[in-house]
Amino acid sequence: MKVRSRTRSARQGFTLVEVIAVLVVLGVLAVSIAAGLNVRASVPVESDILRSHLGYAQSLAMANNTADWSVAFTSGSYTLLRDNAASPFPWPGTSSSTYVLPGGVTIQAGLGLVEFDEWGAPVATHTVSLSDGTQSQDVVITGFTGLVP
């Protein structure tokens, strides 16, 4: 009777332990490389988020049929407000009424307040300029038209 030997050359493929060990090493390598990169937020992505948030504020004004909704801007954040800017209201999917822009992205020139009437139309025309020092993008809010791009 012949006994089979279980040497490395007789086996085919890798064991599960070997595959997991390689994946762990690759994961540690990927994390260390990613930590060394300077990852900055993209101005176009942040302007899309701003457009979405403005559309949300507009839909709240239309749904409630009141002119009590507004968005207050600072250089590094913006806040959703209701009841004539008296009480904050959280953005969708969060518990915070203030959206803080990621590091490096700022709002150029203080806008103050963008208000919506009971039909969801912005009360005045505003231009919000987002910049990170190398690129900038404008979000234009057209007053009295209902257009929030």
Image: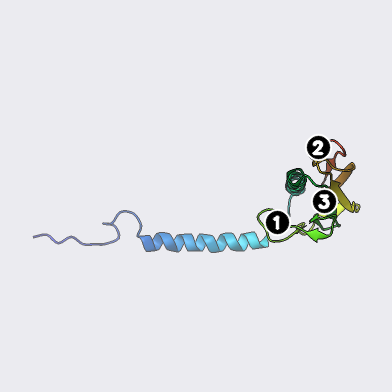
State the image coordinates of residue 65 (x, y, percent, origin top left). 77, 44
Instruction: Nearest to the eye among marks 2 and 1: give it.
Output: 2
Q: Label 2 amino acid?
A: Leu
Q: How far apart are marks 3 and 2 (CA)?
A: 18 Å
Q: Badge 2 is on which residue? A: 147
Label 1's element?
loop
Q: Quadrant of the C terminus?
A: top right
Tag on residue 39?
Answer: 1
Dot 3 or dot 2, earlier in sequence: 3
State the image coordinates of residue 47 (x, y, percent, origin top left). 77, 46
Q: Label 3 amino acid?
A: Asp
Q: How far apart are marks 1 and 3 (CA)?
A: 38 Å
Label 3's element?
loop
Tag on residue 68?
Answer: 3
Residue 1 against residue 111 in the figure, above or below: below
Dot 2 or dot 1, earlier in sequence: 1
Dot 1 or dot 3, earlier in sequence: 1
